[in-house]
Amino acid sequence: MTTRLAPPVFGEPYLLTPGPLTTSRQTKEAMLRDWGSWDDDFKAVTAEVRRKLLAMAGITDDSYLCVPMQGSGSFAVEAALSTAIPKDGKALILMNGAYGKRAAQMVDYLGRAHIDLDKGDYLPPQPDEVDKLLSDNPGITTVFLVHCETSSGILNPLKAIAEVVKRHNKIFLVDSMSAFGALPITAEDIGFDLLVSSANKCVEGIPGFGFVIVRKDLLQASKGRAHSLALDLYEQWVYMEKTGQWRFTPPTHAVVAFREALKQHEAEGGVDGRLKRYSDNRDRLVAGMRKMGFKTLLDEQWLSPIITTFFSPAHKNFEFGRFYNELKQRQFIIYPGKLTLAESFRVGCIGQIDVPVIDELLAAIAETLDVMGVDDCTPAPL
Ligand SMILES: *Cc1c(COP(=O)(O)O)cnc(C)c1O
């Protein structure tokens, strides 16, 4: 049985995208007030949010810390990379999409050494490949992996890779941006050293900040490592510990909205509850799309409950721009594809959407195909 979520504010489309995404009415309403960034009330909100994020990662002692960072998720990834790679260190960047590529670009900006394992658009990096690279390159200090690579929707083999990285005793940085809060990842189970995520993904807050969950001894040892004043995670932490405040202007409204979103996350049953709703969304979406003749990029085992890539139909009447606009008129915003090898588009399963919304979406897609005169959704052969 599914309970219908409250619809978004009247006239608003559903965002079937991997963030910003559709937020609840309560989350939006939490922003109808201004906050002094130095005031005790706001400091308490920051402290509560940091505490709850640690709990979400299964952390019960003070071996890890949560340091929020202003900006979009990439700002926090960049801050984490500069914390995780010593100045004379070397990173192994595991990439199979846009976010792995971006991390390598960031490391170039940092002026630090890196080796890349590039698997192209959608193939998962394999544990034995990582094992071999680490054996052959003893200078590697740090391994970077994207948990769910949002550019294809693939769920990477996190646990198996984590085991290899830990066996080699390297620093392990996980970009769990689009997964944390919906896919279980705990310090105990995965043994990550740093985990990065942001406010506007599976916790369903609004954009404005990211956060890094980091092993305390590693953060303490990283003083002076940052390449950037504003993105210095160590200094952000030191200042926050001392004053309870963010070092520079915090996105106050985003933080209070996030606290509200965290309450709803708890009420839904935490990570398990969220995973269940998103998985139900994905199952209904994939089944409904396949019934219409669409094909998914990925095989079953790699499909995440976060976002799904579908190949565009090869039919002569199919044109993505028109498809997008027809769906937008029907109050659904979808996402263009990011593949180099084929035309595709993506549909997100995250945010304040549930199975009844997916059913409405499927009906809107069927109607749109009809309007466009597309009667066959088979993709072009690869
Ligand atoms: C969203 C996302 C990011 C950060 O992107 P921003 O646009 O900077 O918020 C990083 N990695 C992954 C896997 C993501 O999904």
Image (cartoon, rainbow, N blue to C red):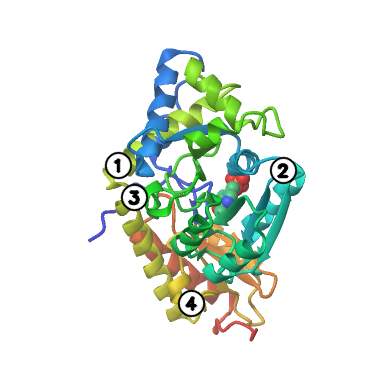
Closest to the observer, 198 or 332: 198
Which is closer to the viewer, label 4 or label 2?
Answer: 2
Amino acid type at image mark 2? Asp
Which amino acid is tagged 4?
Answer: Asp
**Does the Cβ of the disc 3 residue fall within 8 Å of ligand 1?**
no
- Residue drawn 55% across and 81% down? 377
Find numbered disc 4 in the image and state the secondary structure of the residue it sits on.
Answer: loop
Instruction: Please name the residue that numbered disc 2 is placed on.
Output: 88
Q: CA distance from mark 2 to mark 3?
A: 38 Å
Q: Position of residue 336 (x, y in %)?
A: 62, 62
User: How far apart, in angstroms, are the residues tagged by discs 1 and 3?
Assistant: 8 Å
Pick whichever of labels 3 and 4 is earlier in the sequence.
3
Of tags 2 and 1, which is closer to the observer? 2
The correct choice, above or below, for 191 with respect to 219 in the image is below
In the image, taking residue 191 as reference, residue 170 lies left or right, namely right
Look at the image and tell me whether residue 324 can be seen: yes
When the figure is inspected, residue 252 is found, relative to residue 331, above or below; the finding is above
Where does residue 368 sit, x and y in percent of width and height? Answer: 53, 70
* Quarter of the figure with the N terminus: bottom left
Marks 1 and 4, how far apart in space? 32 Å
Q: Provide residue 162's location: percent of width, then percent of height.
A: 48, 58
Q: Residues within 10 Å of mark 4 (few under 14, many from 20)?
A: few
Earlier along the polypeptide chain: callout 1 or callout 4? 1
Give the mark nearer the N terminus: 2 vs 1.
2
**Residue type at mark 1?**
Glu
Report the residue marked by disc 4.
299
> Is residue 122 rendered to the left or right of residue 308?
right
The amino acid beneath tag 3 is Val
Mark 2: give few (<14), some (14-19) or many (20+) Cα within 10 Å: few
Q: Which mark is residue 271?
A: 3
In the rendered image, which residue does mark 1 sit on? 266
Q: Secondary structure at mark 1?
A: helix
